[in-house]
Image (tube, rainbow, N blue to C red):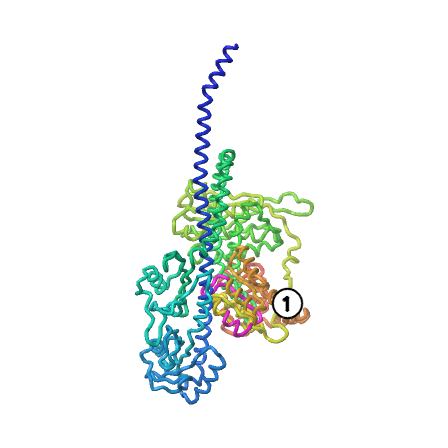
Amino acid sequence: MIQQNSSLSASDRKNHPSRNLLIRFILGGTTLVVSISAYFSYQAARNMMLKDLRQSAFLEVQRGGAEIEEWLHLRQVEVQTLANTSTVSSLNWSVAKPYLKAEVKRINEFFFFQIATPDGSYSNTKVGRSNKNIQDRDYFQKAITGKSNISDPFISRSTGIPLIAISTPIWSNSASSSSPIGAFQGNVRVDRIAEVVNSLHYGTNSYAFALNSQGQAIVHPNSGLMSTLEKPAPSLLKIGDRNLNAIAQRMVNKQQGIELMEIDGTKKYVAYLPLQAANWSVALVIPRQNIESRLQFLDLTALIVGGLAFTMITVLWQVQAFEQAELKKSKAAADTANHAKSEFLANMSHELRTPLNGILGCAQILLRSPALPNQEQYHVNIIEQCGSHLLTLINDILDLSKIEAKKLELHPDDLHFPSFLQGIVEICHIRTKQKGILFVYKPGINLPTAVHVDVKRLRQVLLNLLGNAIKFTDEGQVTFNIEVIDQPPSDGQTVKHRLRFTVEDTGIGITPAELSTIFLPFEQVGEKKRQAEGTGLGLAITRQLVQMMGSDIYVKSQIGQGSSFWFELEIPEATDWVQSAIAVSEKQIIGFEGSPYTILMVDDRWENRTVITNLLQPLGFNVVEASNGKEGLEIAIALKPDLIVTDLLMPEMDGFELIKHLRHTPEIQNVKIIVSSASVFEADQHRSLQAGGNAFLSKPIQVDELLDQLKRYLNLVWIYKQSQPDAEKAKEATIASVQLTPPSPQVLQELVTLASKGNFNAILKWADQLEETDTTFVPFSNELRQLAREFDEDLILNFLTQYAMETV
């Protein structure tokens, strides 16, 4: 036993060096890998920080460029405004001279104003009439052809002072003239540009300069590069410094950026930016240490952290590496999935909500019109129903994540079941008529009158199934069948009905392989051209909604013969549905007390602006429209509206920038701002409110929500349309009933025959024909039309029989 133990101990001692070598190899390799990883991580962090510092330096150039742009834009607007005055357009210098001299003193930014005729002769407020000619000047040539422009700086022939000419055409007041009758210009000194450029700094020994379109210096600390009366400035495109020559070439080519290069014998950063208002560029030269000195703390920190990591790596590496790898893998997968979903939802929501805003908005405007005839109101109602359904689909697709997270809840309500089903049938009739196929509706004879169910979700489920059936059916018919399976025992006093909803079609059918995938998200079957009509989410959401209602969807299909989808629901019967259907308020707003308010509507889509304008103008508001943020800002400064409604996504200047500018403009910084956008992300909503918006309205805009916001922020007192007393209404109804004039007995008999056959379309045509034949038949035709749209054969037969008997 002792010998055996001794032998084992010797064996262990023999293997011990090998184990230590393996451990040292692992630890050494681990340390090397970690050191390399730490180095590259440090380099990545350093590069990111350097990028931020470079961007910070570039922002200084952007600040100067923006200041010059704003100053030039204001001067250009002032020149264009003066050119449009009758005094200037008269071209009478004796009349224009005192006016323009007064304007030079008032504005205090222009060196002089000048009027030139097409032959190049001119007069200005500095030298009066001149015998010189400016036909060779580029700014005059552009203005006389109808283009406003800002010239490169030049030394004036009259004054010898470096100036910038801001010129614009002068148009005749006569409508027959299509060419300018002259050119008007305002000349400003280069001093203001030089002041802004010289104010640009980023640390010690930094300096800025500006170049014109030819690469010549407008402003430069080196006076040898500036123009004088005796010698024009040399172009930086032709100087010997290769690096400065390259930067000048990029600036002339309207490029922007920040680069590290050798200038004046040392490494420097050069940030350059083109201007939009004029064909110039601004650059800022920054010594390298001004930017990179801020990285010294990071370098020192990296050295300390590297030392600590080296001492701790032997203990923590294996666990840390494993956790980091798993964390990165999970984060990458989650980021990819979230990015794809967010991009899809955002694009789909905005693209669909924007046109839908026009559809629903115009429908709401028409429905509020008291002059809309009953027949047109019927069709507008269908448009509004279809638009509302589309909005419901958009919102539900956006709630897909809520369904998956089990956060979506059902909200049942009482409804009149036959009218609910009839609304769905009318929508499907329109779709099938467009495709040239039949739509058959088979309601059960013992359907409940009223039920307690989530109307929104049940409508979505039925229209999704019916819409798929219509989409995949090119000939034959689509059948919608509802039957009562049984009436389970009542739970206390609640009576429940078990209903089976079946959708059948004679379409292309589904293969057995496809049947197993049709309920998966983003899965589509059938031909590619049909797949382009949807997102592949419909059946997935529909099935999940049905499962939330306590059931499931079943399907059977055969290729070339069609498909059948069905599900069963246990739905409680409703008893107080009449009270639930009463509107919250019967009052209609027709105006407001006090003087009119001015509303500025800023949106790049004309249909969105039209909706707001047509909603608010009839109520007494003065609505002004702008197609982008830049235009909206100019109008707001000029008009000072009482309230602004703005979109977020717009060209030129988006809604966020517009709000920022409004809140920083003293004379209008307190204006009320309502942000209206199709964006569905709460981040955009919070961002718009943080930027300075007072409220947020999602598109499509609902009239009641908009009016509530206006009442709140403008302290409005609405004026409502006075409703008639009940007794007066009853009296008018009685009078209307007495004044119904029926047609001849022959026509009445024809109508009875059509009603007995259930031919309601023919009855509607007869109603239109009677109305056109004689105006005395209008009340009778309206009543006949209303009854025909209710599709109740017994009711319409009783009505016609009553008048048929009276005429005998």
Q: Is residue 169 visible?
A: yes
Q: Nearer the viewer, residue 578 or 161?
A: 161
Identify whether 394 is placed above or below 330.
below
Residue in the image at 52% along x and 52% along y: 398
Q: Is residue 718 left or right of residue 125?
A: right
Q: Is residue 519 visible?
A: no
The residue indicated by pointer 1 is 587
Helix, strand or loop at mark 1: loop
Q: Which residues are magenta?
A: 633-654
Q: Amino acid at mark 1?
A: Lys
* Marker count (numbered): 1
x and y percentages locating residue 672 in the rendered image: 58, 67
x and y percentages locating residue 430 in the rendered image: 47, 58
Q: Is residue 229 left or right of residue 506?
A: left
Q: Nearer the viewer, residue 808 or 787?
A: 787
Please tell me whether residue 645 belongs to the stretch shown in magenta.
Answer: yes
x and y percentages locating residue 266 in the rendered image: 38, 57
Q: Which image quadrant: the C terminus?
A: bottom right
Image quarter of residue 62? bottom left
Q: Nearer the viewer, residue 500 or 254?
A: 254
Judge the density around disc 1: few (<14), some (14-19), many (≥20) Cα neighbours within 10 Å.
few
Residue in the image at 39% along x and 78% along y: 161
x and y percentages locating residue 563 in the rendered image: 45, 46
Q: Hey, which residue is sitting farthest bottom in the picture?
A: 94
Q: Nearer the viewer, residue 597 or 348?
A: 597
